[in-house]
Image (cartoon, rainbow, N blue to C red):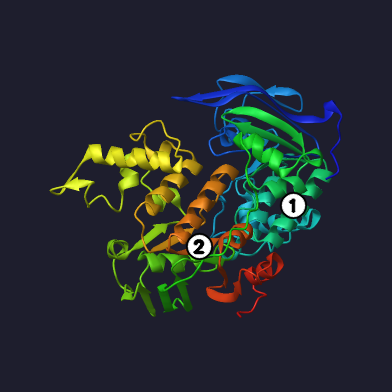
Amino acid sequence: MTPPPSDPAETVVELTGITKRYPGTLANDAVDLSVRRGEIHALMGENGAGKSTLMSVLYGTERPDAGTIRIHGREVDFSGPADAIAAGLGMVHQSFRLFDSLTVAENVVFRAEPRRFGLLDRAAARRRVRELAEEHGLPVDPDARVGDLPVGVRQRVEILKLLYRGARVLILDEPTAVLTPDEAVRLFAVLESLAAQGRSVILVTHKLHEVLEGAHNVTVLRDGRVTARLRTADTTAAEIAGAMTGRRVELDRVHPPGTPGEVVLSVSGVRGVDLTVRAGEIVGIAGVAGNGQSELIEALAGLRPVEAGRIELTGHDITHASPAARRAAGLAYIPEDRAAVGTAPAASVADNLAMGHHRRPPATRHGLLRPAALRAHARSLIERFGIKTPSPGTPAGALSGGNLQKLLVGRELAHDAPLLLVEQPTRGVDVGAIQQIHEQLIACRDAGHAVLLVSAELSEIRSLSDRILVMYEGRISASHTRDDADEHGLGLAMAGAGTAN
């Protein structure tokens, strides 16, 4: 990208010596970060590197133990996000903070409503949102109900909320995690336009290629410290990955194909979907979030009732079996929501690693749990899967997102189930952990297990899958072998333009 203005007087955000401690953790260790006017600045690092903490300090949701924050050269001391917003900062969180029952205009002007005679001036709200949308290339219907909008349009609404409040610095947390490739391209076009207007963007992401194509500069954190400050025009994905992990990382690896055997999973007419998965293969389901993938996987896992159709696992009918019965029959499940569904955050790492198999020996004896056996099992999996935790007794909720994901992957792979259902295995996970999780999924396949993979990341789907299905509006809209699947065609099918083969 064309570099932004280089005049030091144009510095908009300056963090100096930011230090933040939690019990047993030094999250930020004297971190410096400088962002200039008209710059798109990427903040990268492994899970637990301190990125979220640093942005929480900047946005006023956390207070630093040491260090200073300057906005436009003036030292500030934010007591909360309201202070940050008043200073011209705005943040789009990875989980959107919108009211589904309200219109786009109502969401955008919420708590800053234009009024007439003391009442909400709806016409003025709609007019202002329409003007902002046209001005910044963010097409959206002000009267549309947010709950009816696709995820890419909801993100536009979040950005419009910030622009309506006059934000000059936009912080975006993993903004393309749930977007199609075309939506991601459109988003970066918007960000580039905002930067050209003099606004600054701080982009928290783990996607190396997006950073190289869409950001001017990169600051890399590792273990709470800055390990690199790089100009994207002068660096490579490998250099950034090395700064993030401290080691060489193999990027964009396409794994050798599997050797499919007997059918392990057979699905007929479940939520309008037919599919099979064989031993020794990974079948990938691509699609934008909200197109029925999660509902299908929940039905297969027994978390959603099956109203029609049939599910067979290794030849046995499990259509109406309970989740426990499915697990006993040989189904392992890594859900999309690792905190609310996949783990119990208040329970210990050891307890979480045993869940689902805690009623069987060696975890139990005579119906009673054996704490020593649980700890031994946990220590084994912690070492095997590289889970960073102070101890097996640490609450799972204290782990970083990437380590919580490794806990979940390790637990489900530890018991050699014939079938693995896995949703978004690397969402929000850093590049080093991505490589490790991918290798574990390939090893699972090569050991003769069947894997049904759901991911919104096309690079992940193409890297791992032996066959690729695309879901759109609850149906399989396209089917490809790994050899005839290209990113453009898959992206079109994810947007509804594909046809099933």
Closest to the observer: 255 or 187?
255
Examine the rendered structure and indicate whether residue 403 appears above or below residue 310. above
Element carrying mark 1: helix
Element carrying mark 2: strand
Residue depicted at x 63% and y 36%: 244
The picture places residue 256, in percent across and down from the top left corner, at 58, 61
Residue 46: assigned label = none
The picture places residue 115, in percent across and down from the top left corner, at 66, 50
Looking at the rendered structure, the kind of residue marked 2 is Leu
* Disc 2 residue crowd, few under 14, some 14–19, many 20+, Cα 10 Å: many
Looking at the rendered structure, the kind of residue marked 1 is Phe
Examine the rendered structure and indicate whether residue 406 appears above or below residue 474. above
Residue on which disc 1 sits: 188
Q: CA distance from mark 1 to mark 2?
A: 28 Å
Side of 232 where 425 appears, left or right:
left
> Does residue 307 appear anywhere in the picture?
no
> How many marks overall?
2
Observer-side mark, 1 or 2, equals 2
Residue on which disc 2 sits: 453
The picture places residue 99, in percent across and down from the top left corner, at 54, 55
> Does residue 415 appear anywhere in the picture?
yes
Task: Find the residue positioned furthest to the left.
Answer: 366
Classify the position of the C terminus by image quarter: bottom right
Residue depicted at x 37% and y 49%: 411
Side of 461 where 186 appears, left or right:
right
Task: Find the residue positioned furthest to the top.
Answer: 66
Residue depicted at x 56% and y 50%: 97
Of labels 1 and 2, earlier in sequence is: 1
Classify the position of the N terminus by image quarter: top right
